[in-house]
Amino acid sequence: MIDVRARQVRVCERQVCLSAKEYELLLTLAGEPHRAFTREELLRAVWGFHSTSPTRTLDSHSSRLQKKLCEGSAERLVVNVWGVGYRLMDSAVSG
């Protein structure tokens, strides 16, 4: 659950503390939960990058976001779509 007004994220009643960029990444993915976002779209939306130069920023942040969301669980909520980018796992999307 994402409470945008309070800027809080909860997973199974457990509050998750996210950095500003992790939170922005989650909000972007949750904005269109059934969509796979390209790396370029996420880099532009979250970091404001406009070039296609190689960077591991997205990979690092998505990995940390995944760990924080699924602490103590084997379930993945943020998944890499090979050759495309990232999306939320279907089980993370209600409705």
Image (tube, grey):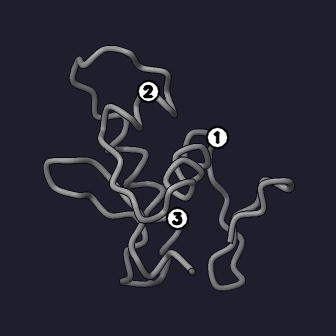
Q: Which mark is residue 68?
A: 3
**Image depth: mark 1 or mark 2 in front:** 2
Q: Residue at x 78, y 62 (%)?
A: 3
| Residue annotated with mark 2 | 44
Q: Is residue 27 left or right of residue 2?
A: left
Q: Secondary structure at mark 1?
A: helix
**78 and 31: which is toward the camera:** 31
**63 and 3: which is toward the camera:** 3
Q: Is residue 15 left or right of residue 26?
A: right
Q: Earlier in the sequence, mark 2 or mark 3?
A: 2
Q: Secondary structure at mark 2?
A: helix
Disc 1 packing (10 Å; few <14; some 14–19; many ≥20): few
Q: Quadrant of residue 43?
A: top left
Q: Residue at x 41, y 38 (%)?
A: 42
| Three-letter amino acid code of the residue under disc 3 | Lys
Q: Earlier in the sequence, mark 1 or mark 2?
A: 1
| Three-letter amino acid code of the residue under disc 1 | Ala
| Residue annotated with mark 1 | 20
Disc 2 packing (10 Å; few <14; some 14–19; many ≥20): some
User: Cα distance, mark 1 to mark 3?
Assistant: 13 Å
| Three-letter amino acid code of the residue under disc 2 | Arg
Q: Position of residue 64 (x, y in %)?
A: 44, 54
Q: Position of residue 49 (x, y in %)?
A: 41, 20
Q: Residue at x 23, y 58 (%)?
A: 81
User: Cα distance, mark 2 to mark 3?
Assistant: 23 Å
